Amino acid sequence: MARREKRMLAAAAAVIVAVFAAVGIYAAVRPGSYGPSHDGCVTVQMPSSTGGALLHDCGAAARAMCRNAFANTGKLSLLTRPQCRLAGLGPPH
């Protein structure tokens, strides 16, 4: 392989990696269509193998999600607790 071909291949690989990184960051930090947690609705953004996942519930489902979050100690529970507090569904700090 010629030096120029190697540079072109490296540049193409760098562009592909940059695109995947940008998509992953965007998916992890965008607020989604639900907006932030408030008034009995809980929105939790959690990292996943595809960049990010959005969990959203209101009413009874949100109360159940928060009960589970405060009863457990897993990573998802730790991410959910602050959002429950913002929604007014959890104990204060």
Image (cartoon, helix red, strand yellow):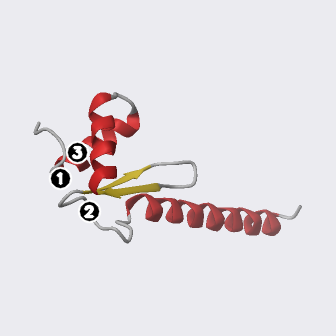
Q: Earlier in the sequence, mark 2 or mark 3?
A: 2
| Label 1 with label 3: CB-CB less than 8 Å | yes
For the residues marked 2 and 3, what is the alpha-carbon distance in whole angstroms?
A: 11 Å
Q: Residue flagged by tag 3: what amino acid is it?
A: Pro
Q: Which mark is residue 36?
A: 2
Query: How far across and down, in percent of the image, does residue 46 sit?
Result: 42, 49
Identify the residue at the far front of this view: 60
Q: Amino acid at mark 1?
A: Leu
Q: In this picture, is 9 found above or below 45? A: below
Q: Residue at x 68, y 67 (%)?
A: 11
Q: Please state which of residues 83 and 41 is positioned toward the viewer in this rendering.
A: 41
Determine which residue is flagged by label 3: 82
Q: Quadrant of residue 67?
A: top left
Where is the C terminus found, in terms of image quarters?
Answer: top left
Residue placed under numbered mark 1 in the picture: 86
Q: Amino acid at mark 2?
A: Pro
Measuring from the top left, give residue 92's x and y in whole percent: 10, 39
Image marks 2 and 1: residues in contact by CB distance under 8 Å: yes
- Find numbered disc 3 in the image and state the secondary structure of the residue it sits on: helix
Percent x, y of residue 66: 28, 42
Do the residues bearing badges 2 and 3 touch, measured as CB atoms within 8 Å? no
**The N terminus, quarter of image:** bottom right
Residue 44 drawn above or below residue 19: above
Which residue shows up at 27% across the image and 56% down it? 59
Q: Nearer the viewer, residue 55 or 10?
A: 55
Q: Residue furthest left?
A: 92
Quadrant position of residue 68? top left
Quick one: label 1, few (<14), some, or many (20+) residues within 10 Å? some
* Marked residue nearer the N-terminal end (2 or 1): 2
